[in-house]
Amino acid sequence: MEGFTDRQLQEIQALLLEKKAQLEQQLRDAESATGVVTLDQTAVGRVSRVDAMQQQSMAVSTLRKAEASLRKVIGALRRIDAKDYGYCSNCERPIEFKRLEVQPQASHCLICQDQLDQA
Ligand SMILES: [Zn+2]
């Protein structure tokens, strides 16, 4: 077991908190965008209503993605608190720090993630 230094964990935690704030902002923005169609229904014509509906469905998919990411970020923060952070939840080997610096919410090592992505 390699484990991470406190300094590395602090760095990761800061990254995660930053991501969390960004995602929460994104969620607020997307939530207000998903209200567009109902709000403007009487005011806009048919063509722009289609536009609004497309924008709304894009906002919904952004919302779903942001929600999923936020769950992962929160999960990673919990694992840091529980001193259980940085191990692949599939093979239980330590995840490379370089990978975590880019994807601090990663819960799988590269090898397992590849297999998941292909599945
Ligand atoms: Zn793994």
Image (spheres, rainbow, N blue to C red):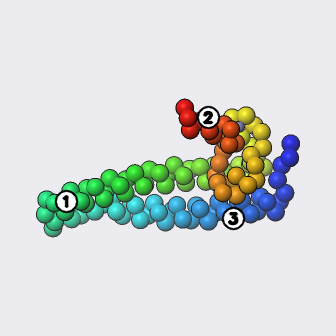
| Mark 3 within 8 Å of ligand 1, using the beta carbon | no
Q: Secondary structure at mark 3?
A: helix
Is residue 17 visible in this depiction of the protein?
Answer: yes
Q: At label 1, which amino acid type do we have?
A: Arg
Q: Kindly identify the residue that appears in the image at 59 percent across and 36 percent down.
A: 116
Question: Could you say where residue 87 lies in the image, as x and y percent from the top left?
Answer: 74, 43
- Tell me if 116 is positioned left or right of 8 in this view: left
Q: Nearer the viewer, residue 75 or 115?
A: 115
Give residue 49's mark. 1
**Marks 1 and 2 close (CB-CB < 8 Å):** no
Q: At label 2, which amino acid type do we have?
A: Gln
Locate ligand 1 by image quadrant: top right
- Marks 2 and 3 sit apart, C-alpha to C-alpha, by 29 Å
Residue under label 2 = 115
Instruction: Please tell me whether mark 1 or mark 2 is closer to you in this view.
Output: 2
- Marks 1 and 2 sit apart, C-alpha to C-alpha, by 42 Å
Classed neighbour count for the residue bearing mark 2: other residues with Cα under 10 Å, few (<14), some (14–19), many (≥20): few
